[in-house]
Amino acid sequence: MAEVNTKAHELALKQREIGVAEFFARNRHLLGFDNKRKALMTAVKEAVDNSLDACEEADILPEVIVDIVDLGNERFRVVIEDNGPGIIKKQIPNIFARLLYGSKFFKLSQSRGQQGIGISAAVMYGQLTTGKAAKIISKIHPDEPAHYYELQLDTQQNRPEILKEETREWKKDHGTRVEIELEGSYIQGSQSIDEYLKETAIVNPHVTIIYTNPKAEQFVFARASEEKPKKPVEIKPHPYGVELGVMQTMLKQTDAKTLKSFMMNSFERVGDTTAKQICENSALLPETKPDNMSREMVEKLVEGIKKTRIMAPPTDCISPLGAELLEKGLRKEINAEFYAAVTRAPEVYRGNPFVIEVGVAYGGEQPADQPVRLMRYANRVPLLYQQGACAVTKALMATNWKAYGMQQSRGALPVGPATVVVSIASVWVPFTSESKEAVAHYPEILKEVTLALQDLGRRLGSYVGKKHRILAEGKKRDYIQRFIPHVAEALKELIGIKDTKKVEDILYEILEHTRGELEEIGVDNPEYDESLAKIGKDEKEEESYDD
Amino acid sequence: MAEVNTKAHELALKQREIGVAEFFARNRHLLGFDNKRKALMTAVKEAVDNSLDACEEADILPEVIVDIVDLGNERFRVVIEDNGPGIIKKQIPNIFARLLYGSKFFKLSQSRGQQGIGISAAVMYGQLTTGKAAKIISKIHPDEPAHYYELQLDTQQNRPEILKEETREWKKDHGTRVEIELEGSYIQGSQSIDEYLKETAIVNPHVTIIYTNPKAEQFVFARASEEKPKKPVEIKPHPYGVELGVMQTMLKQTDAKTLKSFMMNSFERVGDTTAKQICENSALLPETKPDNMSREMVEKLVEGIKKTRIMAPPTDCISPLGAELLEKGLRKEINAEFYAAVTRAPEVYRGNPFVIEVGVAYGGEQPADQPVRLMRYANRVPLLYQQGACAVTKALMATNWKAYGMQQSRGALPVGPATVVVSIASVWVPFTSESKEAVAHYPEILKEVTLALQDLGRRLGSYVGKKHRILAEGKKRDYIQRFIPHVAEALKELIGIKDTKKVEDILYEILEHTRGELEEIGVDNPEYDESLAKIGKDEKEEESYDD
């Protein structure tokens, strides 16, 4: 039989395991390293996000130093140093030179990183493009020495290769410093490191960032508040979100001796009564041994859970910005006429709690004839790329902004002098790719963003409507006032009054009386009149386009 | 020292490896399983793509049977059966129940699958949502028995779990059949299985697909051509695309004894002369031992390669559709007035050859007041999701379609009665996520798509322009002709001619003479006049919007 079926045998010769690092090395655009400009930004972002997460976990007010040195020939040295808790010696190589290694994947609580890919991907990218090892130094206590490593990533094995390790003196009490050399391109502007750091500072007012750009210019984003954000609590999964296959695995792995205790130990919001209820609704005995359950029994359990009323998951696992901070950030950043922000109540997708917050800054010097500027955040990290792929963008475009006084073509971003901020906070943000640039289109998330934007839109619409009304009223008064002197002149002749001035005054009084006082809108902007004029014009254009 | 630094030690307790299957199980939207509707489509797509790849590799005209059975309660049984070469017994569990396992990742030649993730992801999704094992049967030769497996995927280990294995009688000569039970939702329309299979048939005319949908309706997409597409040849990497880090790994792994023989054996387009040239430009001896080279030497080698003129990579590794087939497919699918297609010459990104092809069908019954319909293909696979994230869409939106007679708002899809097809064929298509729905924004790809669309646009523009001219001319003649009888009547009275008919004839002759004959445009469509009228109107609207 050896000679038959050569084709299937021939194909089989090439079928083998693909290393996860090999996979990502070839697909490095999945990790945010598609091009030189983005690569430089992504490397900085992954390191800074890690620093902020580490500080928050250790209850430290973060102070992060970002140094980018232009080495010429499209090479850069990126250095990020923090005052975080440090990393113990044994774990340094794994954290920095092994993909899919970390702590955040396994716990349900809000953090910037969640995959254990980011920083090791930056190390791998540096190595691929320059062949240079990453240099790490970390210290966990004033009395301990600092540990220094030079690391590469073995892409076939996905394991760290240690080129050098030693203890060193480091004058810091504790913290971590990572240095990566990589191919990149530094351009300032909308998707740059500068922008990323600036937007990060806006929603993280408790952070100090000292940034030296490749032109050797230093920027200090100083801490604006000593108050740390509320520390998110770790939670267990909620029974509603757990799928059959996952439940099977959990049942296999549990130490619990009975189904009832398994339910109580492994899930949020399941106490004695709820656990009993679930068993009853599933037609399963509370004493059933978890490791003895057949697929059919697990299916009954999952169905039984659906039939049971269970409290919504706790939300102290999430630390949203708060409408107040969001609006404050907008006021600090954008010179506008009208500001508003909305924080929605927490919702759940696939068992994961999440909160949507939105804000708007309208008018001022923002261009009236261009699509609104959209700023997206996920767990306090600005998302600068892949706007088109993001659920947030989809919800924004699907909202009817004409109803709120903005122009909009079918399925496009609204056009108007506004900046819209959308922020999602969750124990697990579902991104469309490992590079964490866009939020996946989960129906629950799309719905929440839409509802938040509609709420915001109504507030905006009532402002814009008022503005338009006042504008229209102003114009009418203008016309009437223009004729008052002529009417007064005519009246003077007709009924022989001498004091024209007095007639005019009476006419003005009548005008005031019949049309009411001109409403006030809160505007403290010198561009006010000009922007009003603009808006009036835009509205007309929009109408003619509708026909 | 044990009591110090609890925080770093505490954090370290949770730092561990994340299994690749655990990672993708939680991030299953990365694999195309975001929601029930898409999940059903993705499962079918992954299985069909594999079947077509296998048949083509074995030089078999593919015949694929797709059966989808509605089991109620949002559960479906998906069955895909092919007449491919089959899979040898030992590899069946790995191919179907292990992520990142396969043959296509390691060879540079065009194929639909390339990651070794797709079908095992479908198996995993079925298992997560229904707890059911996948059932596989495969046979590699008429004289061999068929092998039957029931498989699950151990998500912690990323290894197959074999629940049942046996040999079976199967009346097929060779082929593979996979059966997966999963949670899904069946909806017909633009992003459905029906659409995916129809679009697949259009660009794969050598394929027969027999499809039974969940409503038990059968559709047969019969083979339209017995001619198989040119079989793509496997190539080695081209020296230009290889980065420093990859070069280091290749040098470590090679069996070659000298740098020169390494260059000749490992790369395309490097013969004796080119290899010598590269060594000279790198200031390295041709006899250098590959495994002895320092990072600095490898860097010199990579720089030396850049300085050497090397022939472009061969392109028989790619099998584009061809402009002719593309246009034929459009004619078959869309009832329009004007068709055109363009195939670009091969280009290279990161060492990977690729070819862009574009086509357009314009006019006919297509709606004139909506964005053009965009159909995207990658290696003959239709891309139905994530249009907004795709490099193809970006290039289409960045092209100035007003110059070619279409409406377009800034940065939006053009509006007009047209369908645009863009197809990329490559040995490695860079997708924005593992679900392979959108092409990543590599500058080389964006540029090629743009150039192709501009070429197409010019052809379209000259047609649309001609159409507008003829429309305008027709209108003018219409006016003149309307007045001819009145002029004739007047002339009759003025100069006393009796035969009005003759005067009219003479006037028509003069008109014909001075204005020339009415141009012909190739229109065999009854909707012709109506669509002409529509287009005239659209153009006016566009102009007014421009102001």
Image (tube, coloured by chain):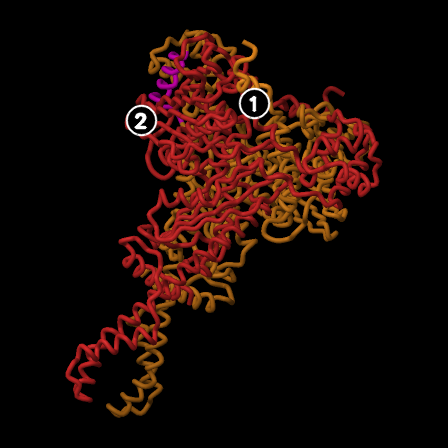
Chain colours: A orange, B red
In three-dimensional space, the C-alpha distance between marks 1 and 2, rounded to whole angstroms, equals: 31 Å
| Secondary structure state at the residue bearing disc 2 | loop
Label 1: few (<14), some (14–19) or many (≥20) C-alpha neighbours in 10 Å: many
Q: Point out the stretch of residues depicted in magenta.
A: A295-311
Res. A414 image quadrant: bottom left
Most foreground residue, B100 or A67: B100
Residue A92: x and y in percent read: 71, 27
- Secondary structure mainly formed by the magenta segment: helix
B474, above or below B64, in the image: below
User: Which image quarter holds the C terminus of chain A?
Assistant: bottom left
**Residue where numbered disc 2 is placed:** B214
Q: In this view, does A486 lie to the left or right of B204?
A: left
Label 2: few (<14), some (14–19) or many (≥20) C-alpha neighbours in 10 Å: some
For the residues tagged 1 and 2, is the chain the same?
A: yes
Q: In this view, does B375 lie to the left or right of A189?
A: left
Question: What is the three-letter code of the residue carrying label 2?
Answer: Pro
Chain for numbered disc 1: B
Residue A106: x and y in percent read: 56, 24
Q: Is residue A147 left or right of residue A282?
A: right
Question: What is the three-letter code of the residue carrying label 1?
Answer: Tyr
Residue beneath the point at 30% across and 22% down: B72
A266, above or below A424, in the image: above
Disc 1 + disc 2, Cβ < 8 Å: no
Res. A229 image quadrant: top right
Residue A218: x and y in percent read: 72, 51
**Residue where numbered disc 1 is placed:** B101
| Secondary structure state at the residue bearing disc 1 | strand
Chain for numbered disc 2: B
